Amino acid sequence: MPSPQETSVKSVVVVPFDREASPAPLRRLVDEVPERWHTVDRSAHAPHIVAVPGDGEDWTAAALVTARPQTSYLKIVDAVGDVQAAVRAVVAHARGQGLAQVKWEGWTASPEAAAAAGFAPLSPPLTPAEEGAGPDAGYVRWLRDGAGTEPPYYGQTTHFTCGAVTALVAQAHAGTLPREALDRRAELTLWRDATNFLACEPVGLGVAVRRAWPSSPVTVHLDTERPVLLDHLPEKEQEWRALLQRTSRTEAGRTGVPVDPRRLSLTAVRSAIGRREHVLLLVSLAGMQGFDVPHWVLCHGVVPGAVVIEDPWAQAAAGDTWVDAHLLPVPDASLDTMSVISADHFRGAVVIGRPQRPDVSSGEPAAG
């Protein structure tokens, strides 16, 4: 991310953005910046202005830019003035930082303007954003090769169904689940089979995926023997959930789901993706969002230095939208750190292999 001090990169001016007071060159450039620049507190995602200098202290173009911490992209919220010049400046700024990607929210950007700047359209989310929580369209420009194919984006509709959503998106990306079947009914049905109330722990999630899609090989990676994701609960609440987790391990043995006690390395994650497998990875949101909450993401692509994930949740209150969460490149070192969970420092993952035979079911997960 940019330094708190103003810097220049190849005639690009970068200054921090304060929603309470716009820089004077920005006020001279446009009569009024979009209201969303000031109504959302984006401070958690290092908002800054990337501008193109003109005569004297004036600017000819500017863009409001943000990004989640510990990631490898920049996101253009809006560009004003000479829009194409502003976007070129952001791309140059991203290249200067060695980032993998630039995204552009489609609040005002047209498909034609995005294409002219070298951006490709993102597939719109399958779940509609709440009013004002995200744009209808978004665009991406990769600065590194090899990201792979784009999965559908589906935002979880509850606070607790991230595990189920990542599994469903993985199967839709693999072609095992029709995209039209990725809906709230499928989300809640798979969650109901996988839940440890309310979270989905790795073994229970792996067993539920195997039940739902018997043709898909599943391996759970969990480098601890004790029950997980329970430390925040009172002792009485932990006891019965721990019993359910032991039951899940028994069910894993019965249904042929291996539970590998070795820690899954980032090298192994990359290898699985290279085999066109999907990795559901349990991470903490402390690095990307500022609060230590366990959360499932889908690892489905790689570029040099980063793993491409789908995050089914976006923090609208911080200006974070589906454009941030979709096709999100996370540096290997960052992902390695954020996927070590709780005081036990365990890592949990579910690897879904390529189907061994075509599914003959309707494509919706079984109810368990």
Image (spheres, rainbow, N blue to C red):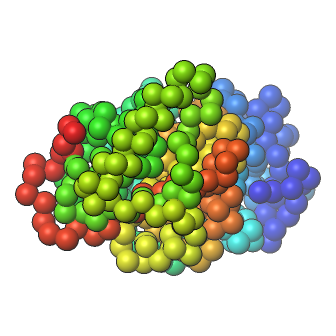
* Camera-side residue of 326 and 41: 326
21 shown above or below 170: above
Residue 337 visible in the shown view = yes
Residue 218: x %, y % from top left: 33, 61
Residue 156: x %, y % from top left: 41, 37
Q: Quadrant of the C terminus?
A: top left
72 shown above or below 58: below
Residue 53: x %, y % from top left: 81, 59
The picture quadrant where one finds residue 2 is: bottom right
Name which residue lies at 31% across and 33% down.
Answer: 192
* Camera-side residue of 243 and 67: 243
Residue 345: x %, y % from top left: 67, 52
Furthest residue in direction left, as rendered? 360
* Camera-side residue of 58 and 180: 180
Name which residue lies at 70% across and 31% down.
Answer: 41
Name which residue lies at 79% across and 42% down.
Answer: 17
Q: Quadrant of the N terminus?
A: bottom right
Name which residue lies at 10% across and 52% down.
Answer: 361
Residue 321 lies left or right of residue 175; in this view the side is right
48 shown above or below 129: below
The picture quadrant where one finds residue 230 is: top right
* Camera-side residue of 40 and 310: 310
